[in-house]
Image (tube, rainbow, N blue to C red):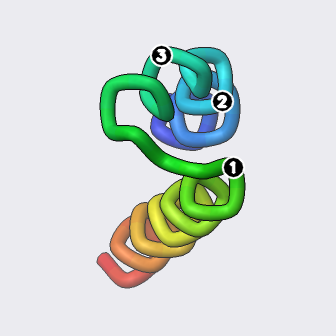
Amino acid sequence: MLSYVDQHMLPAFAAQITAELDLSRQQFGLLTGFAFVAIHALWLGR
């Protein structure tokens, strides 16, 4: 379930998130990449 949310829901709301946080596409890419790595590191590290 966590993998689905991480991989599909965040990009689905990309337009709203980038507008609200005033992020560029590159900044959003770095944010989502970091979120993906952090969640999976925590998930696999338990």
**Mark 2 sits on what residue?**
11
- Front residue of 36 and 24: 24
Mark 1 vs mark 2, foreground winner is: 1
Q: In this view, does 29 lie above or below 7?
A: below
Residue under label 3: 16
Spatial CA span between label 1 and label 2: 11 Å
Identified at 43% across, 28% down, the residue is: 17
Q: Nearer the viewer, residue 7 or 18?
A: 18
Q: In which quadrant will I find the C terminus?
A: bottom left
Q: Earlier in the sequence, mark 3 or mark 2?
A: 2
The residue at the point 40 percent across, 40 percent down is 22
Q: In this view, does 24 lie to the left or right of 44?
A: right
Task: Give the left or right position of residue 17, taking residue 4 as reference.
Answer: left
Residue type, mark 1 in image: Arg
In the image, taking residue 12 as reference, residue 36 lies left or right, namely: left
Q: Where is residue 25 in the image (x, y as percent from the top left)?
A: 69, 49
For the residues labelled 1 and 2, say whether their Cβ atoms are less than 8 Å apart: no
Residue, disc 1: 25
Whether residue 9 is situated above or below residue 30 in the rendered picture: above
SS at mark 2 in the image: helix
* Element type at mark 1: helix
**Reading the chain from its start, which is encountered first: label 1 or label 2?**
2
In the image, residue 30 lies at what x, y percent? Answer: 59, 68
Q: Distance between the residues labelled 3 and 1?
A: 12 Å
CA–CA distance in space, label 3 to label 2? 10 Å
Tag 2: amino acid: Pro
Tell me which label, 3 or 1, sits earlier in the chain.
Answer: 3
What amino acid does circle 3 point to? Answer: Gln
For residue 9, what is the image quadrant? top right
